[in-house]
Image: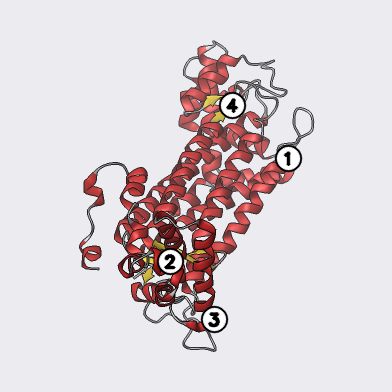
Amino acid sequence: MIERYTRPQMKAIWDLKHKYEIWLEVELQACAAFEQAKQAPRGTAAKIRKKAKINVERIAAIETVTKHDVIAFLESLMDTVGPEHRFLHMGLTSSDIVDTSLAIQMTEALDLIVGGVDELLVVLKQQAFRYKNQVMVGRSHGIHGEPISFGLKMVLWYEEVRRHRERLRQVRNEIAVGKLSGAMGTFAHQGPDIEEYVCAKLGLKADPVSNQVVQRDRHASYATALALLAASIEKFATEIRHLQRTEVLEAEEFFSEGQKGSSAMPHKRNPIVSENLCGLARLVRANSFAAMENVALWHERDISHSSVERVIMPDSTILIDYMLAKVTDLIKHLVVYPDRMRRNLELTGGLIYSQRLLLTLIEKGAQRKESYEAVQRNAMASWRGGGGLQELVGKDPFISEHLTASEIAACFNPKHYLRHLDQIYRRVFGRDRRRLVRTKENAAK
């Protein structure tokens, strides 16, 4: 039974109360830095921490008057903090709080996403070894090319997802920066030491230079990394959709007991998860374009980026978190049809072995041009219904002059195409031979 998707942690990251809690923590750490700089009495931050209460409804009510969320937040704290309130936000600007807090939320979200990527990698590796020696036809332009293994397809996906993991780790490093450099980024009212202290306490790096905001190329890089991951998930889902087509039917999505595929046609088993993933990828990709539009702000800042980020950052991270859970579940429970793969492999009557036949002729001393023409001549005859390619080439005078019947037969063995799989697997998964032992299922095949 496929488990339902539940990831409350990601939703909680973007909860309004959680955002205000981070805002408060930034202010508290700044207050502690003011204490060290002797700009506030010792113990001020501790007193504020003990008394401060976040009231989301109260903040919203104040904001209807102030039309400014950070001011509404700060004014709401006056209800509980008392006289120490005057030591909050000294020499800071709103973006010092908002951008630093947003960096924390984005890193928290990315940590969950990387965890989802790791779960996907585990499933892809399992399927790669499970189907390592499961022969199927490879396709180019949608047309039968040469034999591959279904496991190799999973290895390809695994390596692609691993690249995404490295990319996400890099972008986490880029986004995990804070700034408390003031209104124009000049530290006019508080020195860089305040910023460095606060960022260190929050697990961030101080942005080496900023104006009123952290520069949005960082955020665009973050959104683009998510869009690239979504694009790969869409790629995997598109492949599964093709494999599930009635004419192909080499693999299909798990169809649970009681599931329905169509309100009109009871026989339908549709790739709905894959189609949903393809659609959601479009949203994540569109959000990355919006993030790029945010890079160009007027002078030292404007707020055209703010309204956009309030939508795209929660949406993209929540969508990717969901997509990772769904695609992991999809691949884990994928229904594979080895008999259909073998049948489709033979669908062209041996035409997929033409290159192997050509190269064998050349190895035996035949000229390439004459060899190509001979193989193509028989391939076209086979394509027009004149019989299987192996049968036809066995009767061809040019080919039989250079190859014996057993040598011709060897050209039509699909195992030839899998002989370097171990080396490919070692490249991807390492050189531990124990990882290359066939599963009982593959050994039986």
For the question of whether residue 61 can be seen, the reply is no
Q: Secondary structure at mark 1?
A: helix
What residue is disc 2 on? 353
Q: Extreme right residue here? A: 298
Q: Nearer the viewer, residue 216 or 81?
A: 216
Q: Amino acid at mark 2?
A: Tyr
Q: Residues within 10 Å of mark 3 (few under 14, many from 20)?
A: few
Between marks 3 and 4, how big is the CA–CA gap? 87 Å
Q: Quadrant of residue 98?
A: top right
Eye-nearest disc, 4 or 2: 2
Tell me where residue 20 appears, x and y as whole percent: 56, 40
User: First in sequence: mark 1 or mark 3?
Assistant: 1
Given contact means CB atoms under 8 Å apart, are the residues at marks 3 and 2 in contact? Answer: no
Between marks 4 and 1, how big is the CA–CA gap? 18 Å
Given contact means CB atoms under 8 Å apart, are the residues at marks 4 and 1 in contact? Answer: no
Q: Residues within 10 Å of mark 1 (few under 14, many from 20)?
A: few
- The numbered disc on residue 85 is 4
User: First in sequence: mark 3 or mark 2?
Assistant: 2
Eye-nearest disc, 1 or 3: 3
Q: Secondary structure at mark 4?
A: helix
The residue depicted at 74 percent of the width and 38 percent of the height is: 303
- The numbered disc on residue 66 is 1
Q: Amino acid at mark 1?
A: Thr
Q: Amino acid at mark 4?
A: His
Q: Secondary structure at mark 2?
A: helix
Display colour scheme: secondary structure
- The numbered disc on residue 384 is 3
The residue depicted at 51 percent of the width and 43 percent of the height is: 18
Tell me where residue 373 appears, x and y as whole percent: 54, 65
Tell me where residue 378 appears, x and y as whole percent: 50, 73
Where's the C terminus, which quadrant? bottom left
Tell me where residue 296 appears, x and y as whole percent: 75, 36
